[in-house]
């Protein structure tokens, strides 16, 4: 297993539109394992292949927040191959989103509160599930990445400009 390098804004790789996976094989499973290792190492709750420069429709999510756990973190990884939004609710919800590709910056993003998602797992088995809460927010954030979209595309230009200035300042400070 390998910890992969996470691309950060303004890397043009983050704007790539990922291609559907044609066949679920051991290469795909190895990539998903590397993505999970990379996500845990970076302390994220989700990671899209786009963020590690791989233009394939692959996502990993584990909503477990290790900091909130008393003892050993219980890992509940979910791997998504070719995830698709089948439908979304009219009702929306707001969540203070962050992104490993936009370090230490957060903004309230409004998205559909619930969504119906289909995907393949590492064995090529199709799943379909209605998601809500943080899972709905996270899968929408990750599918956005596969389409070259960042959470900052969903906020006002003023908020985006402030956020990018804060990031520039943070980087300058090291
Ligand atoms: O770690 C992450 N936290 C997060 C918080 C709110 C909404 C979405 C996310 S996903 C993010 C990791 C990431 O950048 N995934 O693409
Ligand atoms: Ni992200």
Image (tube, rainbow, N blue to C red):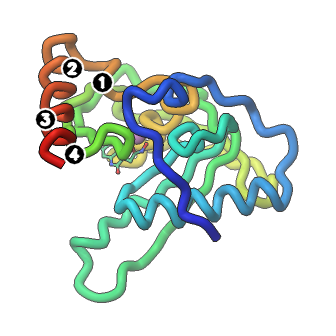
Q: Calculate the distance from the C-alpha at mark 1 to the C-alpha at mark 3.
A: 17 Å
> Foreground residue, 29 or 41?
41
Of mark 3 and mark 4, the one earlier in the sequence is 4
Dots 2, 1 in contact, CB < 8 A:
yes
Badge 4 element? strand
* Residue 1 position within the rendered picture, expressed as x and y whole percent measured from the top left: 64, 70
Tell which circle, 2 or 4, labels the residue nearer the N-terminal end. 4
Q: Secondary structure at mark 1?
A: helix
* Numbered tag placed on residue 169 in the rendering: 3
Q: Residues under labels 2 and 4: Cα distance?
A: 14 Å
Residue under numbered circle 4: 104
Q: Are marks 2 and 4 in contact (CB under 8 Å)?
A: no
Q: Secondary structure at mark 2?
A: helix
User: Residue sitting at 54 percent across and 63 percent down?
Assistant: 3
Q: Which mark is first along the chain, 2 or 3?
A: 2
Which is nearer the eye, 142 or 43? 43
Q: CA distance from mark 3 to mark 2?
A: 14 Å
Q: Residue at x 50, y 29 (%)?
A: 14
């Amino acid at each position: 297993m390998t910890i992969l390098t996470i691309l950060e804004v303004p890397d043009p790789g983050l704007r790539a539109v990922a291609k559907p996976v044609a066949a679920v094989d051991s290469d795909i499973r190895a990539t998903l394992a590397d993505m999970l290792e990379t996500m845990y190492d970076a302390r994220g709750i989700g990671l899209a292949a786009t963020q590690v420069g791989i233009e394939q429709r692959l996502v990993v999510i584990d909503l477990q927040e290790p900091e909130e756990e008393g003892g050993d973190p219980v890992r509940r990884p979910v791997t998504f191959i070719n995830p698709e939004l089948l439908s979304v609710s009219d009702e929306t919800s707001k969540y203070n989103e962050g992104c490993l590709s936009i370090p230490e910056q957060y903004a309230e993003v409004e998205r559909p509160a619930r969504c119906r998602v289909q995907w393949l797992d590492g064995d090529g088995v199709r799943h379909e599930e209605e998601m809500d809460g943080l899972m709905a927010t996270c899968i929408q954030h990750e599918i956005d990445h596969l389409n070259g979209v960042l959470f900052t595309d969903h906020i006002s230009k003023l908020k985006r400009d402030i956020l990018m200035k804060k990031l520039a300042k943070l980087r300058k400070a090291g």
